[in-house]
């Protein structure tokens, strides 16, 4: 199932390039009381709600994708977890480009570990990227994004895939500079997730997916998730050894070589096999 969130927080199922509204299923979510638990309520209850979501979609009149504003399919992650320098060739380009490394020693994920991005940076494809610092270099980084489906702590590698709700395209936008990664990558709108979430049952081999990104029609990055240094099970095992993963938490798995600048007026199109295309407009904030 391809599950999306659009317009004024409606949910829909994407079939054959059209959206079938399934928002009626949200009425079946259990009530929440303060303090609200960590995580995304829809993702936490997705397995139980899925029959209702499918049934509601079956009854709805489809709309064209072009007629709606796609938002992040996950509304309330407790964390956005990112994997720095998780492709060898990206390590090489980062070391070679002073505008990327800014005089700092570039470490692989083995040494650098993971970092967190602010959840307030999260947007969907239709909301676009707003350049807050247009006078500085702002780069695109395309990544496979993993959405956690249930709470887990110290998850063993052998069971890691059981904790995945689904997959989406992730754009980890970054301001280049000397500051810490988490600051430069947590600007509002600098975490793009979408265009929808494909449930885990539809992606048989997440460790072998082709993907690419174009800017104004020019191919900038193109690779396959088989080149990840820390693959998806290891990322989940590693992340959960430090902190509990909650439903809706997002893991950005890392970006390959070819990162480059974007600016207001650009059109970014990202594609991942099994997920589809995501078109994102860039503007000044």
Image (spheres, rainbow, N blue to C red):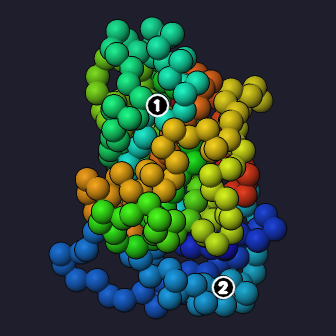
Residue 75 visible, this angle: no
| Residue 146 picture location, percent across and down | 51, 57
The residue lying at 49 percent from left, 18 percent from top is 94
Relative to 27, does residue 262 appear above or below in the rendering? above
Q: Nearer the viewer, residue 216 or 94?
A: 94
- Answer left or right for 7 relative to 189: right
| Residue 196 picture location, percent across and down | 61, 61
| Residue linked to disc 1 | 85
Whichever of callouts 2 and 1 sits on the residue coming sooner in the sequence is 2
Relative to 96, does residue 133 appear above or below in the rendering? below
| Residue linked to disc 2 | 54
Q: Say what secondary structure mark 1 lies in.
A: loop
| Residue 228 picture location, percent across and down | 56, 40
- Which of the image's four quarters has the C terminus? top left
Residue 14 visible, this angle: yes
The residue lying at 68 percent from left, 26 percent from top is 220
Q: Say what secondary structure mark 2 lies in.
A: helix
Relative to 184, does residue 99 appear above or below in the rendering? above
Relative to 57, does residue 225 appear above or below in the rendering? above
Q: Nearer the viewer, residue 280 or 164?
A: 164
């Amino acid at each position: 199932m391809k599950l999306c969130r659009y317009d004024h927080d409606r949910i829909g199922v994407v079939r054959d390039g059209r959206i079938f509204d399934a928002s009626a299923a949200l009425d079946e979510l259990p009530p929440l009381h303060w303090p609200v638990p960590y995580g995304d309520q829809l993702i936490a209850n997705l397995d139980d709600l899925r029959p209702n979501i499918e049934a509601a979609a079956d009854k709805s009149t489809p709309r064209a994708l072009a007629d709606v504003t796609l938002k992040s399919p996950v509304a309330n992650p407790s964390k956005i977890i990112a994997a720095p320098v998780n492709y060898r060739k990206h390590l090489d380009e980062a070391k070679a480009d002073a505008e990327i490394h800014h005089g700092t020693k570039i470490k692989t994920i083995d040494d650098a570990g993971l970092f967190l991005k602010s959840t307030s940076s999260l947007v969907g494809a239709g909301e676009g990227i707003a350049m807050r610092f247009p006078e500085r270099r702002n780069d695109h980084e395309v990544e496979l994004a993993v959405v956690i489906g249930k709470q887990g702590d110290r998850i063993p590698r052998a069971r890691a895939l059981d904790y995945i709700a689904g997959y989406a395209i992730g754009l980890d936008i970054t301001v280049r500079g000397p500051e810490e990664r988490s600051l430069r990558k947590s600007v509002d709108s600098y975490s793009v997730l979408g265009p929808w979430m494909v449930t885990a049952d539809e992606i048989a081999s997440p460790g072998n997916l082709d993907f690419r990104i174009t800017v104004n029609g020019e191919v900038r990055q193109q690779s396959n998730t088989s080149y990840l240094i820390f693959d998806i099970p290891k990322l989940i095992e590693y992340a959960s050894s430090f902190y509990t993963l909650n439903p809706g938490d997002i893991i950005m798995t890392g970006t390959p070589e070819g990162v480059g600048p974007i600016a207001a007026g650009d059109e970014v199109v990202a594609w991942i096999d099994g997920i589809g295309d995501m078109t994102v407009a860039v503007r000044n904030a």
